[in-house]
Image (cartoon, helix red, strand yellow):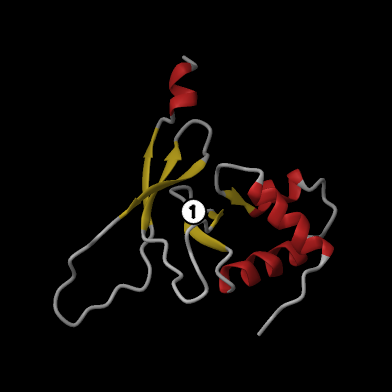
Amino acid sequence: MKRRNTPQKIAVLELFESNTTALNQETIEKLLHEKMDRATIYRILKCFCEDGKLHKVLGDDGISYYALCKSCKDEEHHHNHFHFQCEKCNEVICLKEEIQINLPNGFEMTHCNCVITGICPKCKQIK
């Protein structure tokens, strides 16, 4: 089903295209200067995840972060890669290398949520 692009969807997509890290809903609300309500942002994020434009990762802090899908296609939506969350600035970054996990016979992986925590290079320089 083709969904129509609204000014709100375009604004959210442009926000992700201009950021290099994953964003949580609270950050999105702040960056959009509260131009749309929380429910609208939630619906847009859900729609973008369903359409393969974004993927969601649960951070080490229990908060959902969303990142732009860069190599996914409609028929091939996959994002089995690790994410890195900085313990100081809380930024969540998609790591590019795809992971391969050998599961026991009969098991099929549909999604992988792996978060590595530590200190990012930017925060490591600030001591």
Residue at left 46%, top 70%?
77
Query: Looking at the image, can residue 96 be seen?
Result: yes
In depth, the one of 64 and 67 nearer the eye is 67
Residue 31 screen position, x and y as percent: 74, 44
Residue 109 screen position, x and y as percent: 30, 73
Residue 59 screen position, x and y as percent: 47, 51
Question: Could you classify mark 1 by the number of other residues whose Cα lies within 10 Å: few (under 14), some (14-19), or many (20 or more)?
Answer: few
Q: Residue furthest top?
A: 127
Query: Looking at the image, can residue 38 be seen?
Result: no
Q: Is residue 63 found left or right of 32 in the rendered image?
A: left
In depth, the one of 17 and 42 nearer the eye is 17
Q: Residue furthest left?
A: 105
Q: Is residue 105 found left or right of 114 in the rendered image?
A: left
What amino acid does circle 1 point to? Gly
Helix, strand or loop at mark 1: loop
Quadrant of the snapshot with the N terminus: bottom right
Residue 116 screen position, x and y as percent: 35, 44
Measured along the vertical axis of the image, is residue 21 above or below residue 103? above
Residue at left 49%, top 53%?
62
Q: Which residue is mark 1?
A: 62
Label tally: 1
Residue at left 75%, top 66%?
39
In depth, the one of 24 and 80 nearer the eye is 80
Residue at left 36%, top 63%?
112
